[in-house]
């Protein structure tokens, strides 16, 4: 009887210890997932702001599908960023496919803020850059790609959505909205133009939603990656608890704005428009050398290029 009682007491004690350990492990997993999702969305915010703020000659064409435009070598040194992209508005869980949409491609000023001597040649300084979004499906998460490009000195540079540069997963919704742009005439950029078709982009709001799945014991887990508004549909339902983290990222195209703000003009014989008034290069503006460069990091500090 004493042995049986001891066995019962030890069993109860071990069960209690196991329950406490399981609770601790569950809480630790939950905290780890939350830290990872918050860290990822913070990193997305940093790189979108950092990379896009370096863009030059970036334009906005409302309603234009950039998937049909080539970003190789950034056509004619002009770039575009979509400011009216809304993935969820076109999502259909029954027919969803992991297609990749082009959000933007442009040149960015890659000059380091601690450079010495002469600035690099334009082909090495202005780097082709692209942003792509791979659409999520009920069974596959969405991916945001940021292609940092490479030097143009060797010729045309092909941009593509690969995992060679920056990429971020677990995304279930992505929007580019609230674009602010200024109409301008390339032949007379200082004039007040209200009817011309070209628009110089000054800012865009990106809305990124990342899904974080919560611990669920030892039961089977069913992951679905539909946008939040579709999680009640038959194709998207799940019994695994989750939390969606949304971040609104307001991006200012700083170099683009400064490049347009200069009133210093020069007359050129550029064809096909002779005697066209064009803005002077950056280092000949009234602002002199005041513009935004890629920051230099202290030696040994962790960073991603």
Image (cartoon, rainbow, N blue to C red):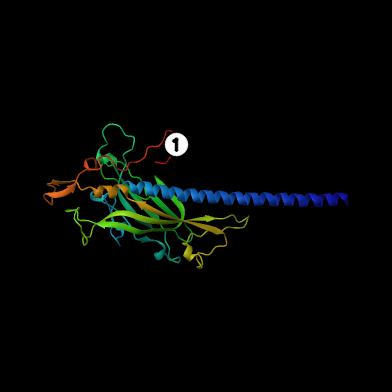
In this picture, residue 211 sits left or right of residue 265: right
- Secondary structure under tag 1 reads loop
Residue occupying image coordinates x 40% and y 65% = 89
- Residue 299 vs 195, above or below: the answer is above
- Residue 301 vs 38, above or below: the answer is above
In this picture, residue 173 sits left or right of residue 23: left
34, 277: nearer the viewer? 277
Q: Position of residue 57 (x, y in %)?
A: 26, 50
Neighbours of disc 1 within 10 Å: few (<14), some (14-19), many (20+):
few
Asked whether the viewer can see residue 129, the reply is yes
Query: Looking at the image, which residue sits at the far top?
Result: 117
Q: In this figure, what is the number of numbered marks?
A: 1
Residue at the disc numbered 1: 301
If the image is split into quadrants, where does the C terminus sit?
top left
Query: Looking at the image, which residue sits at the far right?
Result: 1
Asked whether the viewer can see residue 73, the reply is no
Q: Position of residue 94 (x, y in %)?
A: 45, 67
Q: Position of residue 230 (x, y in %)?
A: 48, 65
Q: Position of residue 19 (x, y in %)?
A: 69, 52
- Residue 220 vs 151, above or below: the answer is below
Q: Name the image quarter holding residue 122.
A: top left
In this picture, residue 38 sits left or right of residue 292: right
214, 165: nearer the viewer? 214
Residue occupying image coordinates x 23% and y 49% = 76
Residue occupying image coordinates x 35% and y 55% = 204
209, 9: nearer the viewer? 209
58, 182: nearer the viewer? 182
């Amino acid at each position: 009887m004493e042995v049986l009682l001891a066995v019962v007491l030890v069993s109860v004690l071990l069960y209690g210890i196991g329950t406490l350990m399981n609770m601790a492990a569950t809480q630790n997993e939950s905290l780890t997932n939350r830290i990872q999702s918050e860290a990822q969305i913070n990193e997305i915010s940093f790189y979108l702001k950092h990379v896009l703020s370096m863009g030059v000659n970036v334009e906005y064409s409302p309603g234009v599908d950039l998937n049909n435009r080539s970003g190789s070598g950034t056509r004619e040194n002009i770039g575009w960023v979509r400011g009216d992209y809304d993935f969820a508005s076109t999502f259909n869980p029954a027919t969803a496919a992991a297609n990749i949409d082009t959000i933007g491609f442009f040149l960015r000023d890659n000059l380091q803020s601690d450079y010495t001597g002469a600035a690099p040649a334009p082909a090495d300084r202005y780097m082709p850059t692209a942003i792509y979004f791979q659409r999520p499906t009920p069974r596959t998460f969405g991916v945001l790609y940021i292609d940092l490009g490479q030097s143009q000195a060797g010729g045309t540079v092909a941009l593509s959505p690969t995992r060679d540069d920056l990429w971020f997963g677990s995304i279930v919704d992505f929007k580019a909205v609230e674009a602010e742009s200024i109409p301008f005439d390339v032949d007379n950029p200082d004039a007040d133009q209200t009817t011309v078709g070209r628009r110089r982009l000054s800012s865009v709001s990106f809305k990124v939603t990342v899904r974080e799945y919560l611990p669920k014991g030892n039961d089977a887990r069913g992951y679905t990656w539909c946008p939040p508004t579709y999680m009640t549909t038959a194709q998207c339902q799940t019994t695994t608890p989750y939390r969606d983290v949304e971040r609104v990222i307001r991006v200012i195209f700083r170099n683009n704005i400064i490049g347009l703000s200069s009133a210093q003009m020069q007359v050129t014989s550029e064809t096909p428009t002779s005697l066209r008034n064009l803005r002077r290069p950056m280092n000949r503006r009234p602002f002199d050398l005041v513009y935004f460069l890629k920051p230099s990091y202290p030696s040994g500090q962790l960073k991603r290029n």
